[in-house]
Image (cartoon, coloured by chain):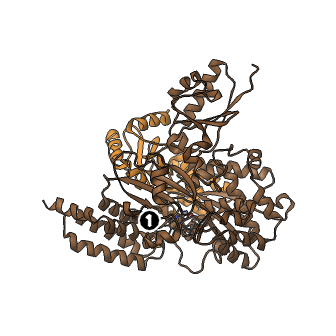
Chain colours: A brown, B orange
Amino acid sequence: MTQSPTIVWIPRDAAARSVGADDVAAAIAREAELRGETVTIKRNGSRGMLWLEPLVEVETAEGRIAYGPVGEDDVAGLFDAGFVTGGAHALHHGPTESVPYFANQERLTFARVGLIDPLDLADYEAHGGLKGLRAALAMTTDHIIEQVTESGLRGRGGAGFPTGIKWRTVADQPDGEKYIACNADEGDSGTFADRMLMEGDPFTLIEGMIIAARAVGATKGYIYLRSEYPDAIATMNAAIAIMEDAGWLGTDIQGSGTDFDLKVRRGAGAYICGEESSMLDSLEGLRGEVRAKPPIPAIAGLFGKPTVVNNVLSFGTVPVILAEGAAHYKDFGMGRSRGTQPFQIAGNVKQGGLVEKAFGVTIRELIEDFGGGTASGRPFRTAQLGGPLGAYVSEAMLDTPMDYEALAEHQAMLGHGGIVVFDDTVDMMEMARFAFEFCAIESCGKCTPCRVGAVRGRETIEKIMRGDNAAENLVLIEDLCELMTDGSLCAMGGLTPMPVRSAIRLFPGDFERAGRTAAQ
Amino acid sequence: MTGSTAEGHGDMVKAICQRHGNDPASLIEIFHDIQAELGFIPEPALTDIAQAINRSRAEVHGVMSFYHDFRRQPGGTVTVKLCRAEACQSMGALELIEKVCARHGVTLGGTSAGGVTIEPVYCLGNCALSPAALVNDRLVGRVTPDRLDKAITEAAS
Ligand SMILES: Cc1cc2nc3c(=O)[nH]c(=O)nc-3n(C[C@H](O)[C@H](O)[C@H](O)COP(=O)(O)O)c2cc1C
Ligand code: SF4
Ligand code: FES
């Protein structure tokens, strides 16, 4: 055969595989063989347009051309249509990077996700990988921390604490054993950015963690990765082995004098282990119970030693900050929310996926312009922002910009950037009940307001559902919420009232209606 | 059966602990590895682990019981984890769970006569392609009862 092989990209991302990417890859290989076409199949991360998965891309002179969602049954037709040269077809979307959903993003943290083979270190470097680390190795540790602080990066795990300040605290502790711990527990419903980064560009996370280690003087690191993510676990382990072989992990990294060992540790299905102190106990082989603060982990963390705990996206954003400079990153965003956030649009939405945008994009733009409205085609009713501990929002709040402070003004929160859309069939009293139920199931049990309050809250809502003294019981719920907010040791019990109260405040009718129906 | 089985597993359990350097901090990894071999954590294993990592049996038991992942009884040959968190609920996960359980003749958490264990889970990170399920280690998106059955059949074979 004389023709040079066409490169066809098919994601290996778990979400793409969950709707048949492996079958499509096999079908394309089979069909190509049958037709005597030379096709090289490469597996990338997902571009984040999850509603188009499996999204197949063909490399042509005009760039990568997208087809999706491709089913096994579409493959023969795609070959008939000449898709290997970018031919027209009902599933053809033109150049991937011109699809508005993708073109209208600002991709910094996710710049390489979907573009490269996640486990090809040369491909990684060719697309700007290791540039940040190389810069960091040439800087003083103070300068690294200054850059991170100057960038305005705030923790992407939910609390939004400035990353540079946390690193400063750890660096300022006396020399000795220190740790870097990556929080990859990603338990929030409606979030999958950590998973996509780990599966689609694992070297970025490792690079960020090495930079952190050098900055604070740590020599050991762990990635606490939830067991619900078997693909991400496999990819991270493979990526660590590759970085070790290439001399980017281990002793005296690239002759810099920096030592850093990194390991993946699996979680075991406990949501609370995403709370940082509970995660540290779990990493020590203990029950994942929340520790009383102080001391903060930066002073006494893993095995009592100073520890940097950051989310996957926080570490994963550090390389681009050091590669392009703090000012470049800081240029994006609004107010005190600098840079970009990988938003995750999920639930009952037509075009669910990952959208990395500068802070300041409105909720409406994400749900309507990117998301395309509800999947069911029914009217929008609400969205929950920031996971199971986050608030529900109403239609009237949709023009609020996504920004830590702006959301707080509306008694809502950004959390880890997840948006779960619901249509008008949702029963907000049921969602409030579920918030309590979830807290009861996942509470670590250490403090009474949470352990007992969550169960009482669920029971009380169930009473209202049965039409039992609705007005009185709503007052009781409010009291319980106050108790949990003020008296809980951590945000699990402390924030469970947020979804509950927002549901009652914004959708009071749902709580009256149920009582009346039951009373009839 | 328990006596000899426990002895038979004793060596395997000890080998797993050793592979983790008998390090108490690796206890959760140790549980995962044992469960990967046996499908559950047999009672006698707790004593073996406790000895190997130099912690009390009560502590080891306390850790195991804290985490939803670990089973004390054998499950079926296929484990299906059905997501019932918010994003999946918005796409009908609760109705789906009811249907799937009815089809297999079990309540959530149980094992069917055909050896399928059906468990709840809270988010699998596939919330844009809800409802989601994990069939053994394979993620399934846009789950319908039929798509799920296909995945179960594939996992069983
Ligand atoms: C109940 C609960 C669950 C949490 N889950 C996560 C999680 O899954 N991932 C995460 O990064 N942070 C989670 N957090 C926040 C962490 O406690 C911590 O703030 C974060 O890991 C710090 O990293 P960052 O500064 O980079 O965000 C959770 C907090 C609470 C209270
Ligand atoms: S609020 Fe709940 S989860 Fe947090 S420490 Fe108290 S009992 Fe544990
Ligand atoms: S909520 Fe079901 S996969 Fe995330």
Q: Is residue A158 left or right of residue A173?
A: left
Residue B137 in sight here: no
A300 vs A478, nearest the viewer: A478
In the rendered image, the quadrant that contains the C terminus of chain A is bottom left
Q: Residue drawn 27% across and 68% down?
A: A460
In the rendering, at what x and y percent does residue B14 appear? 62, 54
Q: Residue at coordinates 50% horizontally, 61% vertically from top-left?
A: B64
Residue B112 in view in this figure: yes
Chain label for disc 1: A
- Dividing the picture into quadrants, the one containing residue A358 is bottom right
Image location of residue A467, percent across then percent down: 19, 64
- Amino acid at the residue labelled 1: Gly
The one nearer the camera, A66 or A12, is: A66
A158 shown above or below A237? below
Instruction: Give the class, few, some or many, for how many residues have Cα within 10 Å of label 1's Cα (few <14, many ≥20).
Output: many
The residue tagged 1 is: A390
Q: Is residue A326 left or right of residue A193?
A: right
Tag 1, which secondary structure? loop
Answer above or below: position of A278 versus A199: below
x, y (%) of residue A1? Answer: 75, 19
- Residue A437 in the image, given as x and y percentages of width and height: 36, 63
Quarter holding residue A144? bottom right
State the count of labels.
1
Single out the residue that lies furthest toward the left.
A520
